[in-house]
Amino acid sequence: MYDLIIIGAGPAGITAAIYAARRNLNFIVLSMDIGGQVAWSTEVENYTGIHLMAGVELVRKFREHMKDYKIKVKQEEVCDIKKKGKSFEIKTKKGKYSSKAVIVASGKSPRKLGIKGEDKFNGKGVFYCALCDIKYYKGKEVLIVGGGNSALESALFFSKLAKKIYILDVNPKLGGEAGLRDKVLRNKKVKHIHSAKMLEILGNSTINSVRYSQGNQEKRLKVNSVFIEIGLVTKCDYAKLVRKNKWGEVMIFRSTKTHEENMTSVPGIFAAGDVTDIPAKQIMVAAGEGAKAVMACFNYLDRIK
């Protein structure tokens, strides 16, 4: 019986784990990866104390910090959480664990297009992480699907290595932050295909082209790689016990009785980071939410002794 089980090892989950270790809680972390969305970030420049750093480098620092406290992450996918009397049973694809409290901090995963060829070429030309899959676009022609900050950041990153970058966007104008947008529009390697909808990804063993519609016309574009940047979906299907909003995000609140933060609709289950309904989806915010969630757990565990 653990005091706490933390699900997820992004900024929220890692911060919660470090705080839990400092309080000598008996806990484990369950996650299929370490770093979460930070690992996909090309550059991080809004994390206090860090002027500019690649996402993978920040994840390395996260790992070092966890190593200092001898925190290990069990690479197991969580399938379900069940209430068992005053405690919880967490089921993974490998086994079952019991704990007095739970922190849900599993973040979000890339949203898929749901078109023909997407699954077929996943990992063979279709990617969802620019920085992770750098070797697949060096000197090649790349298509980015999307028009928000993630798409713009990827386009700027690709421009240093790729031969040509296309941004295919359903909207008539690029979105995202003005500064990023201006940089992209000034870049001669980048072409914006606006008001367009992806229809199919084509190829043999690897991608050679895509089919899309623009207005009343259907067109084809020769590209070597497709990077899909159309947003994220929450990774918390396993958390059926707790209340969620219409976007599938875990709803959290502050108790008026105990003043504990990051509570879900189920006492003893807390949540933090991008998996929740907080509006600000930022690395800094997620880390702070992880700290808040585990401090609320401290109070909860003291109350149920």
Image (tube, helix red, strand yellow):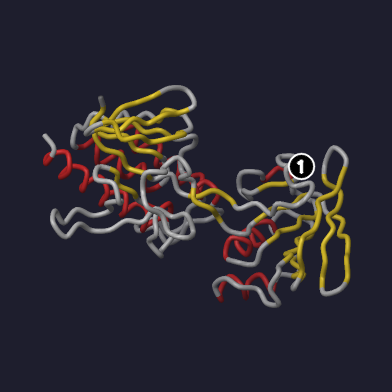
Residue 250 or 6: which is nearer the viewer?
250
Q: Which residue is rendered at x = 38% and y = 61% of the image?
A: 278
The percent coordinates of residue 115 (x first, y second) are 75, 52
Quarter of the image with the C terminus in it: top left
Count residues near mark 1 (Cα–Cα under 10 Å), then give few for <14, some for 14-19, many for 20+: many
Q: Quadrant of residue 286?
A: bottom left
Residue at mark 1:
121
Dot 1 falls on a residue whose secondary structure is loop
Residue 65 or 282: which is nearer the viewer?
282
The percent coordinates of residue 238 (x first, y second) are 45, 40
Query: How many numbered marks have been drawn onto this rendered protein structure?
Result: 1
Q: In the rendered view, does 244 fall on the left or right side of 202?
A: left
Q: Which residue is rendered at x = 12% and y = 39% of the image?
A: 302
Q: Which residue is rendered at x = 23% and y = 58% of the image?
A: 254
Q: Which residue sits furthest top?
A: 95
The type of residue carrying mark 1 is Phe
Q: Quadrant of residue 125?
A: top right
Q: In the rendered view, does 241 fall on the left or right side of 261?
A: right
The percent coordinates of residue 41 (x first, y second) are 53, 53
Q: Which residue is rendered at x = 82% and y = 66% of the image?
A: 213
Q: Is residue 78 above or below residue 104?
A: above
Quarter of the image with the N terminus in it: top left
Residue 113 or 53: which is nearer the viewer?
113
Q: Is residue 110 above or below residue 71?
A: below
Q: In the rendered view, does 196 fall on the left or right side of 134?
A: right
Q: Which residue sits furthest front?
A: 85
Q: In the rendered view, does 243 fall on the left or right side of 37?
A: left
